[in-house]
Amino acid sequence: MSFDAAGGSTLRFRRVGIVGVGLIGGSFALALKTVKAVDTVVGFGRSRANLDTARKMGVIDQIATGWDDIEGCDLVLLAVPVGQLPEVMPVIAPRIGKDTVITDAGSTKRDVVLYARAALGNALPRFVPAHPIAGAEKSGAAAARPNLFVGRPVVITPIEETDPFAFKRVRATWQLTGAKTLRMDVAMHDMALAATSHLPHVLAFAMMNEIAHRPQAEAMLSLTGGGFRDFTRIAASNPEMWRDICLANRDSLCNEIDAFSARLAQLRHLIAMGDGPALEREFESARVARDALTATLNAGARPRD
Ligand code: NAD
């Protein structure tokens, strides 16, 4: 897997529409403003309080007065939870200008492409699906920051209908945020992310609930060290967003949950049997793999998540 060469330093947009001005949408807007790639950012959202915060913070310049404001945008980013896209795409589709490019930030891609094919009509070739592998357990415009994508991978998953010019424009735009872009097939993206992102979130939610709902929870949680805190940090993530991701990628995620359950059952068996040498071999193999990942991350060959 290799990252694309950077480019697009002269790219500039007159009006960028951010649909969903949260952590991701807000950070994208701030990043483009930082490199002066946009004159005006218009925010579309469902929470007035969040949009007011975004405007006060300078994340957006204007709050959209209605969906018709999509018409004047030459770039649109869809950054709502993926489960909202079947509602949002048909509303924006007839308002997308003929030269406007559209991208998204959804953590799953197969469902997003299905929705786009169903809703975007003539604008479909100018929709370039993307997923920034960057984020945090915080949400909303107040969590946005201009450097969120710096050095991080952004996976771009063009489909057969994608116009090559729109692809290049969107790729160059994500690169302007400081991200490293890479191109990937939709199915490969969803399978890989089920294992490396969606499963860890499900495990963190399960672990947190398992302890928090016990009668002795308070006493137990007072004894948490770095391990528990590191492991469960992502359990503080946005529940709506993660509900949508898990449902959208349910087949791949269920496969990963099954594979993980089998591995956990194997460890349980070794522990129950008191098989120290086999247990140590398992742990050693994981340690070697984790050390190699740390070395790769430190060398900058692959940006940290
Ligand atoms: P967020 O909750 O911070 O922001 C989402 C915003 O969308 C909110 O401001 C919400 O009010 C708005 N919204 C929801 N429904 C809407 C609708 N129907 N119309 C208009 N606005 C609506 O979430 P986020 O973390 O910025 O995630 C946005 C997208 O980015 C999601 O699709 C998610 O899968 C993806 N993503 C998130 C992360 C992460 O770590 N948070 C990482 C990569 C990709």
Image (spheres, rainbow, N blue to C red):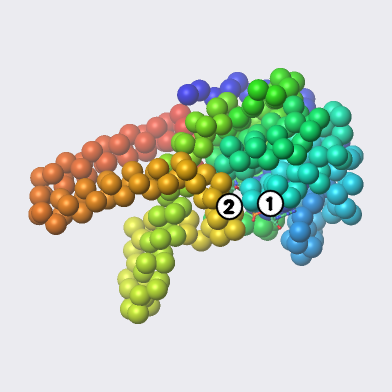
187 or 4, nearer to the observer: 187
Vertical arrangement, residue 9 with respect to residue 226, above or below: above
The yes-or-no answer for disc 1 within 8 Å of ligand 1 is: yes
Q: Residue at x 77, y 25 (%)?
A: 10
The label shown at residue 244 is 2
The yes-or-no answer for disc 2 within 8 Å of ligand 1 is: yes
Type of residue at label 2?
Answer: Asp
What x and y, as percent, mark residue 138?
58, 57
- Circle 1 SS class: helix
Q: Residue at x 63, y 48 (%)?
A: 82
Q: Residue at x 27, y 50 (%)?
A: 264
Callout 1 crowding tier (Cα within 10 Å): few <14, some 14–19, many ≥20 = some
220 or 158, nearer to the observer: 158
What x and y, as percent, mark residue 146?
67, 45
Instruction: Name the quadrant containing residue 51.
Output: bottom right
Vertical arrangement, residue 160 with respect to residue 271, above or below: above
Type of residue at label 1?
Answer: Gln
Residue at numbered disc 1: 84
Identify the residue at the far front of this view. Answer: 118
What x and y, as percent, mark residue 46?
76, 59
Asked if marks 2 and 1 touch (Cβ < 8 Å), the reply is yes
